Image (cartoon, rainbow, N blue to C red):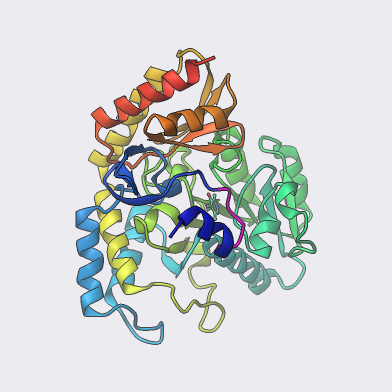
Amino acid sequence: MNIYVNDAEYIAGTYARFPLHIVSGKGALVYDETGREYIDLQSGIAVNTFGTADDEWIKAVTDQLKLCQHTSNLFFSDPCVLLAKKLCGITGMKKVFFGNSGAEANECAIKTARKYASDKYGAGRHKIITLENSFHGRTITTLAATGQAVFHKDFTPLTDGFTYAVPGDITTVEEMMKSGETAAVMFELIQGEGGVLPLEHEFVKALAGLAAKYDVLLIADEVQTGNGRTGKYFAYMNYGIAPDIVTTAKGLGGGLPIGAAILGDKVKNTLTSGSHGSTFGGNPAICAGALNIVSRINDELLSGVKRKSEIIIDKLENADGVKSITGMGLMLGIETQREAADVINECRENGVLVIKAKNKVRLLPPLNIPDDLLTKAVDIIARACAKQ
Ligand SMILES: *Cc1c(COP(=O)(O)O)cnc(C)c1O
């Protein structure tokens, strides 16, 4: 079978794939159909937290698969409860709703915010503030939440009730909140798809202060930034705030689909029987794997993330052809003199996988990538950046 021809013929044309056919991998290495090796600095877009085909995670998933692969949410099951308890322990938050993706985690957060406001204040307080240049998902509602017009066109009308503020513009946020129509403010601490752009500390603190003042819920979209990616378990922990809802997905399952909305004290009892649900949400095998992943994101691993981040920054920040580096931990964006796409292609041709975020080269390596592989990969990136 010619994969390129058949993919073009049978797969919906939503992805501009790189010309690379990955068939296997181990840790931070992946292999194409000819056996050629690549150092993977994208982890399936921050999904493969401990790289490809991690032994411990495979064992956790397969042990559970052999017991029972699915129960439906009409019955009790251990792995999802253990995972929820673990996430509450890490965050100090109270309850968890499990879905299957980042978009669904955000949908749950949005529904929770609307119900919280409606339970407490009645109708008319349904608006959600999000930020310009944000990304929150591809469903009609999470597209509405996404503050980028380019994703909206062709799909209107989108879900009503979203208003966009410019990151840093706290005055406009306060105006919006004052009107008494706002249920929540939702934001990524580091805008990932938007170009690996961290929010300013001062802005985030001010946002949290206003949210508390106006009883507007603070929703941190940690779909990409969560699960150790930035050097803390969640990125909000770098900012000293306490969100009311934290959504996460990508890295949580270590490679299998799961999303979670973690609910704080204010909203712990907002969702009631029948108000939300998911057939696959809380799947036992995926949750057993996620529990293994979450349990391994400990202080030692997190200090490793920070150290590896410094290895990358030290090598690249003054390198030829590098204009700037943004991001935190192992979520970094490199602004290059050359077109990012050219650098990315050249890296791949030389055995290193990196991806794009807007005009930047985006690095999202596995959190446990060995230092020697990382160093080797970064040298290849540096050469690609320096080339005229
Ligand atoms: C990827 C992403 C989403 C969407 O997640 P899916 O699993 O693709 O639905 C939402 N928010 C952020 C910040 C993301 O990076």
Q: Is residue 142 above or below residue 30?
A: below
Residue 294 covered by magenta stretch: no
* Horizontal side of residue 1 vs 116, given as left or right: left
Comparing 379 with 218, the one in front is 379
Whether residue 228 is visible, yes or no, is yes
Image quadrant where residue 63 sits: bottom left
What residue is drawn where x is 39% and y is 72%? 282
Direction front: furthest residue: 1
* Horizontal side of residue 20 vs 221, given as left or right: left
Comparing 187 with 156, the one in front is 156
Direction bottom: furthest residue: 74
- In the rendered image, residue 366, in percent from the top left (x then y), is placed at 33, 42
Image quadrant where residue 253 sits: bottom left
What residue is drawn where x is 58% and y is 39%? 204
- In the rendered image, residue 235, in percent from the top left (x then y), is placed at 45, 43
- In the rendered image, residue 44, in percent from the top left (x then y), is placed at 42, 49
- In the rendered image, residue 281, in percent from the top left (x then y), is placed at 43, 73
What residue is drawn where x is 58% and y is 68%? 112
